Amino acid sequence: MINVFQPSLGEAELNAVAEVFADNWLGHGPRTAAFEAEFAAHLGVPADRVVFLASATAGLYLTAELLGLGPGDEVVMPSISFVSAASAVASTGARPVFCDVDPDTLNPSAEQIARALTDRTRAVLVLHYGGGPGDIARIAELCESRGVPLVEDTACAVASRVGPRACGTFGSLSVWSFDAMKVLSTGDGGMLYAADPVVAERARRLAYHGLAQSSGLSAARNAAGGGPDAGRFDAKGTKERPPPPPAVPG
């Protein structure tokens, strides 16, 4: 049998897992921070703009909160998408508004999105279907001209670009998926990118319940001797009060 999706696993991956066991450090920590930095370099964005998450779906729900969606708001998205995009919007009381897609690429054009925009539109959420960028550059221009935030679901577009620019960097917010069926897999996992550094910092705090460090273990190690998380996590282990929520542009 030839599998449609099959992760490529071998000795290198086994050794990486063995290092985690040897360190006795589970959960978010220095490896997470290193992955965020390397992924940011891959995108060509500052490392503080990306946040590793449990899944892309978690990122979509977090995005809905960052946008401040609520009853009466509308979010335009393609009619062909993954269920969690509409679910994240609907969970806030906002309304998903579906637009048509190109029959060849299964991605929407700027014109198809424009026809679905109203004075209640609070965001546009596009999916790069199968990793194809589609009309993303023109869609980004449309959203900027209308003052509407653009969210990119780049779950399958971890290596897709439009010229030199990586998919996921055209919008205000973007999410990637690293589950077992994606181009890059961490077993499960996701990444969120925020163009605004203030929004990115708020996303990081919301993702970890407002805690200033990833775990008590990281705080204890840093307090003991400036461990590998020093500078990123609070060495005192205190719970800082998060700043007031910043407004997402648009």
Image: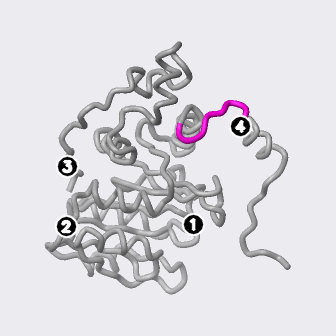
Residue at mark 1: 131
Q: Which residues are magenta?
A: 20-28
Instruction: Please say whether residue 21 is one of the residues in the magenta stretch.
Output: yes
Q: What SS does tag 2 mark?
A: loop
Tell me which corner region of the image, top left, top right, bottom left or bottom right, holds residue 85: bottom left
Q: Earlier in the sequence, mark 2 or mark 1?
A: 2
Residue type at mark 4? Phe
Q: CA distance from mark 2 to mark 4?
A: 43 Å
Residue at mark 2: 70
In percent of the image, x 35 and y 82: which residue is there? 99
Q: What SS does tag 1 mark?
A: helix
Residue type at mark 1? Gly
Q: Which of the image's four quarters has the N terminus?
A: bottom right
Mark 2 residue crowding within 10 angstroms, few (<14) / some (14–19) / many (20+): some
Residue at mark 3: 247
Q: Which of the image's four quarters has the C terminus?
A: bottom left
